[in-house]
Every structure is written in C-alpha cells, then in structure tokens.
Amino acid sequence: MSSLQFRFNRRQLIAAAAGAAISSQVAPAIISAKEVTQNYPEPLRDPASYTAYVPAACKTGQYAHYTCEFDASWAVMKTFNVDATLDQQITAMGHDLAIEPYYVEDSDGVKSYGGDIQHYFSGDYETNFLARSRGKAMRKVFEAFDLPVRTIKNRKEIEQSLRKQRLIWIKTAVDLKPGVRATWITQRGATFPAVLGNDHAVIVMGYDDNFVLIRDVLGPTSTNWERPYEYEVPWDQFLACWGAQGSDGLAVG
C-alpha cells in the first residue's frame, strides 16, 4: 500500500471513525473497475540461479492507494491465466462496512480498531491507510476462481511451494522494512498482529540460500522512486517483516 498514510492524524482518524459507522452489515463493493496496464520487467538475474523460480505476472501500479492485497492477488491469478477485476475480487471477499478503521496509541502500544479482516476487507481503500484484509479473507478470492490454495506459515513451506511452481501471496510491510507494530482489534474483540503505517501485500516468486525474490506491483512512488517491480530481500529481513503480520501467507497454484 502506498505510504500517503500520514495525511491523517490520530484525532482525525478517531473522529472520522466515530462518524462513519456505515452499517453493521457486510456488503459487496459497488465500484468502477480500474484499468490494468500489464508490464514485463526484466528478470533481476538469471532465473536458473535460484533454487526455485516462478515467473509472476506484473502490472503498473495498484488499483488505488490501499488495494495492495488485490493487486498482489491479481499478479498471482494472471500468472495462472485468470483475469479478475478489482470489483470481482472485492465481491468475492466481501467488504466489512460496519466501522471505518482508526487507531489509538497508549502505554500498551498501538491498537487499530476495524472490521473483521480475517473474513472481509475493512476500510476505504481510496483514503484510509488502515484499510486491509488478511490471508484467510483472500483465500475466498482465489477459491472463487477455482485456484488451489493452502495456508503457509514458515520458510520451509515457502520453499516447498515454490519448488512445486506455486506462487506465494503474503502480508508484510512496504519495501519489507520494519514498521510500527500494532494489534488489530475487531468489533467482536478478535485480535491480529499488524503493522501501522506500512501495511502491504506482495508475491514471493523465488528463492535461494540467501535471498527471497519479490514481485511488488506497487512500483515507484513518492516514498521510494527507486522501487522496482522485482527485488531481492535477505531471508532474515523477509522473515522478520512477514512475522510482524503473523506470518500470514497463501500458496496458490
């Protein structure tokens, strides 16, 4: 997700959330499809140099500021010859409109309050940097398009999946850099590990003993004009950032 997030301060977010409880129902999104421009970045290095490598599709930029989950899933599905629009993906997942997410910070740390991200997408993906979902919710999207999907939680499962030519959808942080850790709290009191301002989703498309290869359709933005669509991250850095999101991942294909 783009890091335009700090346009809001805490007071504004709390005030907005208090006045923006839309309804208690989970509703399908009513949105216009965003145009997709596919691109074809050159491989970072010889694919044969990786222990496992899956050539992942890519497009130029995200649908909106905070749609990274659906942009990453687009790359997965396009790789397996499935065309899915943003409308179709959000309809398959569902959009929790019961509360617009907000956060508070106190002596116990940062707490984000929002919808049921384990089962639905929560928040305004155009304006709210807290808008997001988790892997269990995204699983519904892949299954809606008849793609085999399984939950993964560790390095061994990533490596095994890539060797079987499956792509890995994960929740992490923008540029896979440490951010502010937070706890997401739903209206029913369920809690999930999260990051605050740099929540992101990317695709793992390869690995070797030292690095993980990432497909990131976010591309260059004002937070990093040098961000490529394909880059390597050391395993320890990757596992730390993934772990901050509860090692939330799906193997698809």
Image: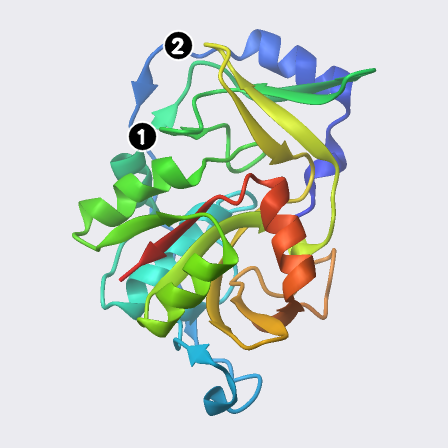
Q: Which mark is residue 17?
A: none
Instruction: Work out whether 160 lies above or below 151.
Output: below
What residue is shown with label 2?
23
Q: Residue furthest right?
A: 107
Q: Residues within 10 Å of mark 1 (few under 14, many from 20)?
A: many
Q: Is residue 11 left or right of residue 186?
A: right
Residue with the mark numbered 1: 94
Q: Earlier in the sequence, mark 1 or mark 2?
A: 2
Q: Is residue 5 left or right of residue 143?
A: right
- Which residue is pictured at 63% across the width and 64% down the height? 235
Q: How is the image coloured?
A: rainbow
Question: Foreground: 230 or 135?
Answer: 135
Crowd around label 2: few <14 · some 14–19 · many ≥20 (10 Å): few
In the rendered image, the residue lying farthest to the left is: 146
- Tell me the amino acid under the disc marked 2: Ser
Residue 147, how many percent across, how many down? Answer: 21, 55
Query: What residue is rendered at 44% in x and 28% in y?
Result: 117
The C terminus: image quadrant? bottom left
Q: CA distance from mark 1 to mark 2?
A: 14 Å
